[in-house]
Every structure is written in structure tokens, then in C-alpha cells.
Image: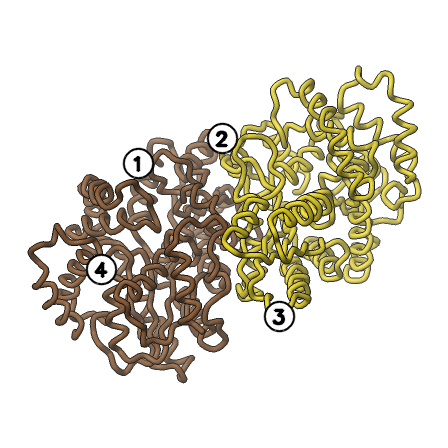
Chain colours: A brown, B yellow
């Protein structure tokens, strides 16, 4: 609450010249207004009792339709994820042009992304477990830090700095590391301090990737088994499990981004546990633009399977941990309704996202508990840049974490 | 030596009519002559005592310099791995043109590929363990079936059919499935029976992928830990572990070939066990031709790391299980000597291949033992084609295994 009041004041001061301000300030402003209207949430409340703060990092999504524009602008301005010529002009221009379309999509899934609701719930449930199994670091408090939507990482960091925490854990909510997701969040943390020339008071450590965690795998296995059981035994063996992950430009992959290998690991572990009984493939969704991205594409794979007489599918959103527009719109509506009908798909099931699945919550708690008890505070892997990295911020960010997590 | 003398002789016998014979017959001929002169090996001996036959499948490599030509010809004629226009003419032409270069490389690593020696040793050691832990299916006998070198799969199948086995297991020696390796071996088994119109007397089952097996992972972990321990503690943390796997054309990957995801899984499991302590990347070697393949390339990654001041590397051959030309020549000589010297690499270690590592032998035995005891006889995954598969043989092959492994 303290933070929101404080930010309210600063927002009032800078409200008029908004369109002439640099993007960082604009981000802060819209976040301030948002915070101001969300006083009752755990994240926005100063809780001086918390000893360990866990920052749940994610790209995020707009909770309401009016937030779509800012979300897209923040996204298209982030050079960690997209590199455009004249980005400060072209980024907002593309964002503005895309806003109505994306707003329409969010409208079709209930008027906004549920990712904040889920991240909060996941964090709170995880902390309840942690308070029991890790009394020495309790009370634990989950903070949400989104990259492009409210609550923005920068605002949450300000709050965390005020909360007199003994430990702060930057915990990516992407099980699989990509420079475009977790990497961008890490850079945002570094830049928050660097741009303000502030030394953090917090005692940081990082959980940067966890795609092989046995309980993450178990949660997927459990959901897939349940889904298979609900399918007519006559066709059950014919069901093809399509693990669908957000695609990535090959330009990023070819620089050494570890994402496809890490997603592959989760898929293999799940299917090893299922004894490779059903056929499966890892496919990639949500490609944008004309350049080559990871393939095969989810929709093209379904189309090809249909041509070869396969008609039964379970779609598994493998790289996100809660529902978001790529599950609720792309998988459920664009492929599950429109494409499936057009192609004559007979069975189309989309596996529920992990959301508040009890095994998944256990996974989150176990990850943090192990991290607190055994470390490492930061992995050698997080501190290393991709072999062909061209982003100078990555190098500075890694130096910063190397010092802060000693 | 025996083999090379034998091949010399067989070359003399068949040298005249060779070019008028279809490739399949040529393969059979040179393989028959080779077998004829290798009676003392376990594989070539009829062993009526064996109850369970385990066919160790691999692409293979020429054991002697005179075998290089045939090896390359078989390779360039295989449409499962390379699709060329006018393949029956162009394949042998390219093979012939490349032979002197490849012979020179084999010359530099001792005059031939050690892969047959290692596969035999691995098979014999595995069977010794199996005879102890699986008395009910003993005696076990390992057979070697190479795709392009002696002993050719077709010749070994002929032998297995004669051996009155109760069970026959097609056991790929590639932990990670690719249509271009394991897939090609599976197609070769199917084609052996289909082209001769023979019904197999054998009771078949298949081990088609095993990149997540805990003992495979442990063997790598053990070797990496040992290698790291032998490096000066002052620089140990700076060592970058480069997992290097044979690259694959994107055209194959984009059809849905599961290879990159499966290799990624082994890498992630190894590094999870090592707590992601050292930085690492999965990189790809041995690209041929101008089309796009999986990247980043091993040599380019080293070059880029050097530019950013990194000078210490361990190279881990992750996708083969024994030494072969890609470890002994490409990693050891081309990169380890020539490139490392040129770039100023300070530490260049190449992890020993698994070869006869005791944990790896345990892994092989455990895989077969579990397969015999729990199955499945064939996975749903092996029986499914890639979504964008264009190879009709794959479809027929999968139908054949589906029937044979019931």
C-alpha cells in the first residue's frame, strides 16, 4: 500500500507529458495506476513480517482489455525479445496497429489474461507449503513481477526493497530458459538497479530453469493419464500427444538459446515415464512474421496427420505453467474449434494448464525449498552468455548477478 | 588386419562385374566375403545355445581403409538419410569422389573405425551381465547389424534366423531416435524381409530410444566430474561444457524428427545432476552441404566463445556411444588440434566416449533386462510416422513392426 500511494503521487506529477516520456517512465505510470486500483492484493501490500521473498517472474499478460495496448507496447519495445530498426518508433507503431486484433482475442477469452490470477494463486499456495516445510526461512511471501503487464517487475522490486526481506529469490515461472523470456526478466532486474544507480539491499539468489524437476514431470504425467483414461478405449492407443510450445526464431536458437533442448527434456521425461506408449511429437506454436522459426508448427502438424488418416489428438501446453492466450485462444479456439472443424479432427483434447494442480504446487515448493537448503544461489549456466550472444545487456546482467548472488 | 586382407581378396573377386550389379547385391557380396573371412568372431559364429539374440544396430564405420569406398556408397545410396536426384547414379559418384579424403582421415586415426571393436565389446559385456541378472532369458547373444559397413544388418539377420532364437531384440545403439539413424536401421530390417518375401521366424521386440536412462546419464556425469577434477581448480569453474552432437538438416527436423529434443533431454538430465554448476551448451557438428542444419555449430561456438574471452572447454560427444571418426578426427584433430591452436584455446578436453565404461555397460544391460521383463515390445512412438513424413518405407516398416511385435 505504501508503494502504491507513493507511486500515485509520482504518477500525478508526470501524468500530462506522458506521450513525450521515454518508455520506462510510461511503464511505471500505467503500473502505478494499476497498483492504485489493486490495493487489496497480496503483492501490493507491504508485509513486514515476510522473511523470504519469492519473485515469480513471467512475461505476464493484460488482465483487462484497456491494458492490452500497454502490454503490446512494452513487448515490442523489449530488445531482449524483438530487435527492430528504429525500435522506439516502430515498436509502439506495431503495438498500436495490433491492439484491436489482440483486444478482440482477449475479449473472446473473458476480457483479459488469467495469468495474474494464476500466478498469485500459485505463489500463495507455494508459500503456504513452504511455511510448513521450511520454518527456518518462514514466513515466505510471493511477489509477482511481470515483464510487460502489471504488476511490472520494476514496481515489485521497489516494493521488495522496502519489505526488509532477509532473502530474495528471483524465481522464473518458465521451466525452460530462453533469452527471450527468463533472460529478459533477468535483464529487467539488472536494469532496474543499474538505470537508477541503486545498490540492492536484498540478498539475491536465482532459480533459472527447472524443466527436469520430477514433480513438474509428474504433474504432466498425471494430467495426461487422466485425459487418456477419459478417451474411448477403442481409440485410446491411436491418440497422438502433441506437446505444443511457443516457437522461437531460428536466429535466436542459432545463437545458442537453450530453450528447445530444455523443452525437449521435459517432453522426453514425461514420455519415458509413460513408457512412450502413445505416439507423440514436440511441435511449436505462435510463430510471427516471415523469418524461419522452430518447426514443425502445431497447426501444420495436425494438418499433416489428418492427411495420413490420424484423427485423435491431445494437445499439451508444455512450456507455460498456467492458462494464457496461447492456450485459451490459440489452442482452444483457433485450433480446437476452427481448425479441427475444418480438417475433420475427431478427438481434440487440450490438456488443462498446470494452474493450481496440487502436484505442480508441490513442485514449486520443492524447488524453492531445495534452493534454500542446498543452492546453488546462482548457476554457472545462468552466468554464461550464449556463444553467439549479441546483447550487451546480457553480459552486464550476468556480471551483476554474479556479484549479487555470491 | 584379417578384415582388411579379406576385403582385399573379395575386392579382387568381385571387381569385374561389380558395376553391373544392383547395390543391394553388391552390399551382400562384399559383406558375405567379409563374413566368410571373420569366422572367429562371436557374431559370425552360429551359436545354437543362445536363447535371446540382441541385435546392436548402428550406422557403423569402415574397419579398414579398403572398406571406406563401400561404406560411403552404401551411405549415399540410403534414401532414409539422403535424398538425391538420380540417387543410383549420383550416390556412388559422390561416394567415389569423397573416398580418398575420407580414407586419409581414417588413416590419421589408425586406419579404420573402431566402432565394430567397441560394439562387439559392449555387446559381449552386456550379455555377460544379462546372463547373470536375467537367467530366464539366458543365454543372451549380441549380434552386430551395421547399416553401411560390415557386418551389414542383412547378413546378421540371415544368421539370426538360422540361430533358432526364442527372442530377438532390435536394440538401437543410438540413445536418441532419428529417422536418419535408428529409423534407417528399422527400415533395413523391414526391407530385408519384404524384399525377399520372407516371414521371420523370430519373435521380435524393439528398444528404439533411451536418452533418458538414468545409468546413461550417470555414465556421462561420472566422466564429466572426473574430467573437471583433473582441471586446475583456478580455472575449473570457467570451463564451458560443450555437448556436441551430429547435426541434422533442418528439412528433416522440420518434418518432425524427434532427434534434437531427445539429445536435449540427455544434456539437461546430465546438467541437472551436476546442478548446472558449469556453463554448458548443446552444439552440433559434422554439417555437410549448403542447406541449413541444426545450429550453433560446434566450431563456430568455440570461435565465438574465444572472441568473448572464454578459453576453457570440455567437449562431450553426446549422441554416439563409442569412438568413431567424429570423435577421433573431427573433435580430436580438426577442432582439438588445428582449430584450438589457431584460435588460442587454452584448455581443450574431449570427454572419452562411453566405449566400455562400466556404468554404460550396466545401462545397456539394465535397458535390455527391463525390456525383457516389462516391455513394451514396441512403443507407440516407434509405430508413428513423423507428421510431415514423406518416406513411404517408414509407413510400411511401422506396419511390419506393429504386426511382428504383437
Nearer the observer, B12 or A197: A197
Of residue B286 and residue A48, the one placed in the foreground of this image is B286
Q: In the rendered image of this protein, does residue B94 appear above or below residue A297?
A: above
Q: Quadrant of residue A95?
A: top left
Marks 3 and 1 in Cβ contact (< 8 Å): no
Disc 4 target residue: A150
Discs 4, 2 touching: Cβ within 8 Å: no
Left or right, A171 with respect to B25, comes to: left
Residue where numbered disc 1 is placed: A338
Q: Secondary structure at mark 2?
A: loop
Q: Residue at x 78, y 52 (%)?
A: B122
Is the same chain shared between marks 3 and 2?
Answer: no
Q: Is B162 displayed left or right of A272 in the figure?
A: right
What is the C-alpha distance between the residues marked 3 and 2?
56 Å
Q: Secondary structure at mark 1?
A: helix
Dot 4, crowdedness within 10 Å: few (<14), some or many (≥20)? many
Mark toward the viewer: 3 or 1: 3
Q: CA distance from mark 3 to mark 1?
A: 59 Å
User: Quadrant of the image for the N terminus of chain B?
Assistant: top right
Q: Label 4 vs label 2: CA separation? A: 45 Å
- Host chain of mark 4: A
Q: Where residue A8 sits in the image (x, y, percent)? A: 11, 67
Position of residue B271 relative to residue B251, above or below, is below
Judge depth for marks 3 and 4 and give the one in front.
3
Marks 3 and 2 close (CB-CB < 8 Å): no
Q: Is residue B15 above or below residue B373?
A: above
Query: What secondary structure is marked by label 3?
Result: helix
Say whether marks 3 and 4 touch (CB < 8 Å). no
Q: Mark on residue B233?
A: 3
Label placed on residue A308: 2
Q: Do pointers 3 and 4 mark residues of a single chain?
A: no
Note whether residue B380 is visible.
Answer: no
Amino acid at each position: 500500500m505504501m508503494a502504491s500511494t507513493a507511486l500515485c503521487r509520482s504518477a500525478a506529477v508526470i501524468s500530462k507529458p506522458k506521450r513525450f516520456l521515454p518508455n520506462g517512465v510510461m511503464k511505471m505510470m500505467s503500473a502505478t495506476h494499476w497498483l492504485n486500483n489493486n490495493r487489496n492484493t497480496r503483492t501490493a501490500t507491504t508485509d513486514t513480517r515476510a522473511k523470504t521473498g519469492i519473485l515469480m517472474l513471467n512475461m505476464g499478460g493484460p488482465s483487462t482489455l484497456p491494458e492490452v495496448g500497454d502490454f503490446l507496447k512494452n513487448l515490442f519495445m523489449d530488445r531482449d525479445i524483438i530487435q527492430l530498426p528504429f525500435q522506439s518508433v516502430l515498436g509502439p507503431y506495431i503495438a498500436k496497429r495490433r491492439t484491436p486484433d489482440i483486444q478482440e482475442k482477449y475479449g473472446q477469452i473473458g476480457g483479459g489474461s488469467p495469468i495474474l490470477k494464476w500466478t498469485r494463486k500459485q505463489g500463495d499456495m507455494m508459500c503456504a507449503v513452504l511455511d510448513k516445510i521450511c520454518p527456518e526461512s518462514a514466513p515466505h511471501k510471493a511477489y509477482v513481477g511481470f515483464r510487460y503487464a502489471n504488476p511490472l517487475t520494476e514496481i515489485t522490486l521497489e516494493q521488495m526493497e522496502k519489505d526488509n526481506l532477509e532473502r530474495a529469490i528471483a524465481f522464473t515461472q518458465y521451466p525452460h530458459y530462453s533469452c527471450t523470456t527468463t533472460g529478459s526478466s533477468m535483464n529487467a532486474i539488472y536494469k532496474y538497479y543499474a538505470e537508477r544507480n541503486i545498490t540492492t539491499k536484498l540478498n539475491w539468489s536465482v532459480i533459472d530453469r527447472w524443466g527436469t524437476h520430477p514433480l513438474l514431470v509428474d504433474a504432466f504425467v498425471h494430467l495426461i493419464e487422466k485425459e487418456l483414461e477419459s478417451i474411448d478405449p477403442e481409440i485410446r492407443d491411436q491418440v497422438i500427444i502433441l506437446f505444443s510450445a511457443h516457437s522461437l526464431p531460428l536466429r535466436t536458437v542459432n545463437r545458442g538459446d537453450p530453450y528447445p533442448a530444455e523443452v525437449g527434456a521435459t517432453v522426453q521425461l514425461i514420455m519415458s515415464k509413460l513408457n512412450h506408449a502413445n505416439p507423440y511429437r514436440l511441435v511449436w506454436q505462435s510463430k510471427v512474421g516471415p523469418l524461419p522459426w522452430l518447426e514443425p508448427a502445431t497447426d501444420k502438424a495436425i494438418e499433416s496427420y489428418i492427411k495420413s488418416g490420424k484423427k485423435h489428438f491431445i494437445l499439451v501446453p508444455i512450456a507455460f505453467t498456467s492458462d494464457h492466450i496461447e492456450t485459451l485462444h490459440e489452442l482452444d479456439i483457433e485450433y480446437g474449434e476452427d481448425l479441427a472443424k475444418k480438417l475433420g479432427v475427431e478427438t481434440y483434447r487440450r490438456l488443462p494448464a498446470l494452474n493450481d494442480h496440487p502436484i505442480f504446487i508441490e513442485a514449486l515448493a520443492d524447488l524453492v525449498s531445495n534452493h534454500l537448503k542446498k543452492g546453488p544461489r546462482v548457476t554457472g549456466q545462468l552466468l554464461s552468455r550464449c556463444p553467439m550472444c549479441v546483447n550487451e545487456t546480457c553480459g552486464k546482467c550476468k556480471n551483476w548477478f554474479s556479484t549479487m548472488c555470491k
